[in-house]
Image (tube, rainbow, N blue to C red):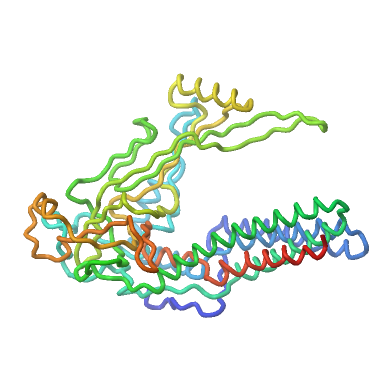
Amino acid sequence: MIEALNLQSGSFKMVLPYRWHGWLAYVIFGIIALFGIAVVMSGLSGITEDLVSGFLITGLGLLGLAVFTPGSHEKDLHDIRQQAIDPAELEAKAQQSGLTIDSWFLRQTTYVPTNDPNDWILPAPGPASWNTDDRYAADADGQPIPEHPVRVGTPVPASFSLYGIFGTSAVLCLILGAGVGISLVDKQDSKFMVIGFISLVAIIWLILGWLRAKMLNQMIDTPTSLVRSVAVGHHELVGQVRPSHEGVLRVVVDGNERMFMENMVAYNWTYEQHQERTVRTKEGSRTERRWVTIRSDSGGCPFMLHDGTGGIRVNGHTFKRSDYGGFLKRWDGAFAETLGKQFMSSLVAGVLGGWRVIDHRWTLYGIKLGNPVYLMGEVKPRSRADIDAENLDGTMQNSIIEVWGDSDGVGQKVTLNRGTELSNIGRSRSTVEMIALPMLLFLGAICLLALA
């Protein structure tokens, strides 16, 4: 299975959606793009306004196609997961996923995502096979876990894909639409406002793309160390989350016992309100809606990263950068959890702008026992007191060291990600695509200055 997958995607790879909602989005945005092209064709006959709207509509459609285009290895890894994982295990996860209606009257629902791209792609050791007597010892066979980079290699995204083609075409259409639109505007200030807005979007997009590209290159270029032989210093490690000496957390979201998650080692939850208000204007009235984050909390505890060759203690709560992937669970309700909170939330929203609260949402992100993790961290010696507290004899090198995430190395940024290197890079775009598109948009904005 995984042996037949070419992890070096080369210069170009065409990847199409592999789930029904991806194909639905392709159809919708494809129709929008075709409609925009038709409007552009009609505008070529002399109606300049049609050219503006046509280019912008086409750009929007192409941008949607780019967003819903999977990463270079995403479809292949999804197929491998379906073949490699025990069907009974997949069925058990499917039964635990999806939407559950907790209360019709209070409109309370619970949703667990049916697809988790950060989960294992290849089978991982189950709790029954974990060494509970010595958490630092190797597994029975002493080999790295099946999904370890030492065994499967490191994937490299294609330099260019359909995402790049659709994205480049979208940027060009948006620049052309903005250029034709600016030529129709007489006020100089309005022209500079449009150019300034496009430049700001391009700069933010470029910065985000550059940061993501740096992390991607770090994953690809840094060799992954094995726990049994890792030394002091900054290292890349991949493994499975297992309990440390201190145990695990039972996370109660927003202090409500109805919303909880067991066996957590790192978490982040948010409480949001869906608010609306009616705004009166000269043209009439309109309804505005928004999601507002009211409260949030995060935390964690030490855990063991085990890669099959041994376990190492990780101080997950110290990492400056953490990416937990998609949410683990989400609770929705038409009302707050108590009458007092419902009254206060409505009162505060009403005072601050005349908003009405129409929905409440609690979302939990995090890392649980058994999850795959990828990290770049600093390995340091443990104190004598910590070693004695666990009654360790210190004969295993990996038992007298631990991982911290509070300081970067030379050219190495500490980070903690849910998922293995294979799953994290498999969904990524290439460095070229992450940087070239926003750079093209920024250059286009500079060119628009000639029309100002």
Classify 280 as above or below 249: above
Classify 103 as above or below 447: above
Q: Residue 127: x and y, percent?
A: 22, 54
Q: Residue 314: x and y, percent?
A: 26, 56
Q: Residue 61: x and y, percent?
A: 70, 59
Does the image show residue 1?
no
Closest to the observer: 63 or 354? Answer: 354
Residue at x-position 15% and y-position 60%: 399
Residue at x-position 59% and y-position 57%: 204
Residue at x-position 29% and y-position 39%: 250
**What is the residue that sits farthest to the right in this orientation?**
46
Number of on-image labels: 0
Closest to the observer: 139 or 91? Answer: 139
Residue at x-position 92% and y-position 64%: 45
Q: Quadrant of the C terminus?
A: bottom right
Closest to the observer: 354 or 193? Answer: 193
Q: Residue 450 sits in which quadrant?
A: bottom right
Q: Quadrant of the N terminus?
A: bottom left
Q: Residue 297: x and y, percent?
A: 39, 39
Q: Relative to residue 286, is residue 117 drawn left or right?
A: left
Does the image show residue 349?
yes
Q: Relative to residue 233, is residue 100 drawn left or right?
A: right
